[in-house]
Amino acid sequence: MKWQIENKYRRLEDVGQEEIDGLISRVDRCPWRQTYHIQPISGLLNDPNGFSFYNGEYHLFYQWHPLGPIHGLKYWYHTKSKDLVNWDNVGIGLRPDTYFDSHGAYSGSSIEHNGKLHLFYTGNSRNEHLVRHPYQCIAVLDQHGEIKKLEQPVIDEVPKGYTEHFRDPKVWKDGEQFYAVIGAQRTNETGCSVLYSSPDLLEWNFEGEIKTQLDDFGYMWECPDYFEIDNHGIFIFSPQGIEPVGDYYQNIYQSGYVLGEKLDLVGKELKHGNFIELDRGFDFYAPQTMKDPKGRRLLVGWMGLPDIEYPTDPNGWSHCLTVPRELSIENNKLMQRPVPELQSLRKREIKVVDTVINETKTYDGFSGTAYELFCEFENVDAAEFGIEFRAGEVEKTVIKYDAVQRKVILDRSLSGKKVGEDYGTERKCEINAKKFKFHLFVDSSSVEIFVNDGGEVFTSRIFPNINSKEIRLFAKGGCTEFKAVKWDF
Ligand code: FRU
């Protein structure tokens, strides 16, 4: 136990270069390294943090444990981009090197103020008995790229009625006032979120708990995020402890939103509809949004989940971030679309228009390990139709529509190396439509599938053999017409 704890909290600064070089060369030999997703140079990546646009560039940090694929001591790793597509690794953003963040610089957000980007994060500290105490801290990034922490936390206490599970501040500005939501656990071990306000990002006032209709909904709410689109209030959070119901809540932890009226900042009340999962795939958690200079609300998520082993672990790394998605509200529903900037990745284009009748077909050039594929199905009378991809002799990942169940189904039972099988190998989502559009972003070890213009998204890691490259179209129990376009990346 003692060894495990010491090992868990090992610091990058205390490890010799030889060990780091060895780890990185193990990572570099991994066949599942991604080609266009943000991934760690070594160790474990989790939540996106501090997503923002500052000084002419997008900044995106993430939770990082450098020394192996475990949830050890957490740093913020800093990446930046001019176009949301090509990301530069800047290096460590925050080190857990003060009394207040001694056991991890945990998740948080950022906002520009007085010409500087203010990073607002949770300092996770533990005392000699390993009792946790969270501090909410600020660090400031200036125009030269230098990051300096404030000496004292800006919130050093957990308000009465909440446990030490109190973290992940998400900050925004409304008029002249700053606000932040923080993920919390009540002392009766139910999850919620609380609201703070500040005139200057330094003095923070506890406004109280955000009143929702989800009083007893899991034991902890992580990574809350509040924003507005077209006069709607949207509150995203990642509740833990929700039991599966039918096709819902099938992953170990959830991540979703409620849509409603704008948050009443005085009454702290959010009037909202049902909790809706943001993603229907296997690996998606702790997303964060930002508003960019074009006025778009952009979202990035962690393409992974806590407490699950991944096949890249033996290679010394795990997880990546999703591609950025643009959010909009259409017919009272949150839509998610890949940002158009991703089109700059497109190289060779291949188009196929065909009808498949009780068969599975392959096409010239329809293969690969990193590409975008857009496929529209029409005039369907098949009982089942869809796409097999990253397919080989035995392996395949399948996205299909089952017209009998009226469900879109992602099946990764034959995707390659197993992952998270205890939580099932299929994800299903009921959709009633006549036309189906499947828009896939495939990388060496992942797929993001935007269904019907982003009404639903299935995000998943997959771990196939590098030779499993085929793309096949199929129909069973009838036929379907389809039009497909594929772009190599
Ligand atoms: C979510 C989370 C956050 C926390 C961070 C620690 O995945 O548990 O609540 O701040 O990860 O890495």
Image (spheres, rainbow, N blue to C red):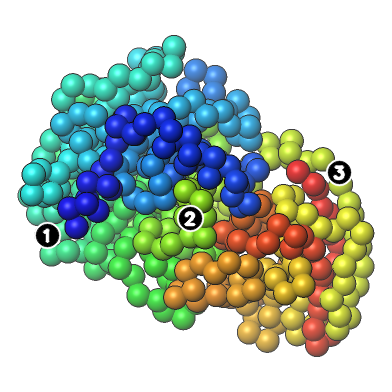
Whether residue 218 appears in this view of the structure is yes
Q: Which residue is mark 2?
A: 314
Instruction: Specify the amino acid type for callout 3.
Output: Arg
Residue 148 occupies quadrant? top left
Instruction: Assign a secondary structure to mark 2.
Output: helix
* Nearer to us in this view, 404 or 210: 404
Q: Secondary structure at mark 1?
A: loop
- The residue that appears at 38% across and 16% down in the rendered structure is 146
Q: Are marks 2 and 1 in contact (CB under 8 Å)?
A: no
Is ligand 1 within 8 Å of the beta carbon of the residue shown at mark 2? no
Some atom of ligand 1 lies within 8 Å of the CB belonging to the residue at label 1: no
Of circles 3 and 1, the one toward us is 3
Q: Alpha-carbon distance for marks 3 and 1?
A: 57 Å
For numbered disc 3, what is the local secondary structure? loop
**Sequence order check: which comes first, mark 3 or mark 1?**
1
Q: Which mark is residue 307?
A: none
Q: Amino acid at mark 2?
A: Pro
Q: Which residue is mark 1?
A: 187
